[in-house]
Image (cartoon, rainbow, N blue to C red):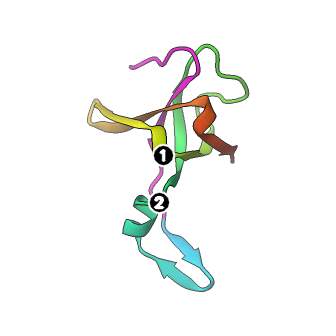
Amino acid sequence: MIKPIALNILVEDIKETSKMNGMLVSSKDVENSRHKKAKVVAVGNDVPNIKEGDVIFYDTSRSFTTYNDDKKLTFITYREVLAVV
C-alpha cells in the first residue's frame, strides 16, 4: 500500500449522481466537476482532523491520480479538503 507523507492524503473517488432542482445531472458532468467526494485511504503523518475511512469533499485542481492494485487513487494535499462528511 502507498503511504503518503507530511500533509498529503490518498483518496479513492466515490462515484455519484447528482440531482439539482428535480433534474438529474449526468454522471459525466459530476465526474468533470472541480469538486469531488472521496473516501480517505491513507493520510500523511502531519494531517490533522482527517483519518482513514473518512468521506470528504475535495478540490481536484491540484490533485495527482495514480493506480495501485487496479484501484484508481488520487493524491491531494490537506489544503484541498473542503469538508469532512
Residue 70 tag number: none
Residue sitting at x 41%, y 74% = 26
Q: Is residue 44 above or below residue 41?
A: above
Residue located 48% across and 68% down the image? 17
Secondary structure at numbered mark 1 = helix
> In percent of the image, x 63 and y 83: which residue is there?
21
Horizontally, is 21 left or right of 77 in the view?
A: right
What is the three-letter code of the residue carrying label 2? Ser
- Apparent side of residue 55 relative to residue 61 in the rendered image (left or right): right
* Amino acid bearing label 1: Thr
Residue 2 place in picture, x, y as percent: 40, 20
Above or below, 55 against 40 in this view is below
- Count residues near mark 2 (Cα–Cα under 10 Å), then give few for <14, some for 14-19, many for 20+: few
Please say if 10 is above or below 47. below
Q: Quadrant of residue 48?
A: top right
Q: Which residue is mark 2?
A: 33
Which image quarter holds the N terminus? Answer: top left
**Sooner in the amino-acid sequence: mark 2 or mark 1:** 2
Q: Secondary structure at mark 2?
A: loop
Q: Is residue 19 above or below residue 66?
A: below
Q: Magenta stretch? A: 1-16
Q: Give residue 42's position: percent from left, percent from top.
A: 52, 25
Q: CA distance from mark 2 to mark 1?
A: 8 Å
The overriding secondary structure of the stretch rendered in magenta is: loop
Q: Are marks 2 and 1 in contact (CB under 8 Å)?
A: yes
Q: Is residue 44 magenta?
A: no
- Which residue in the rendered view is the most extreme toward the front? 61
Magenta stretch encompasses residue 15: yes
Q: Position of residue 13 (x, y in %)?
A: 45, 46
Q: How many marks?
A: 2
Q: Which residue is mark 1?
A: 60
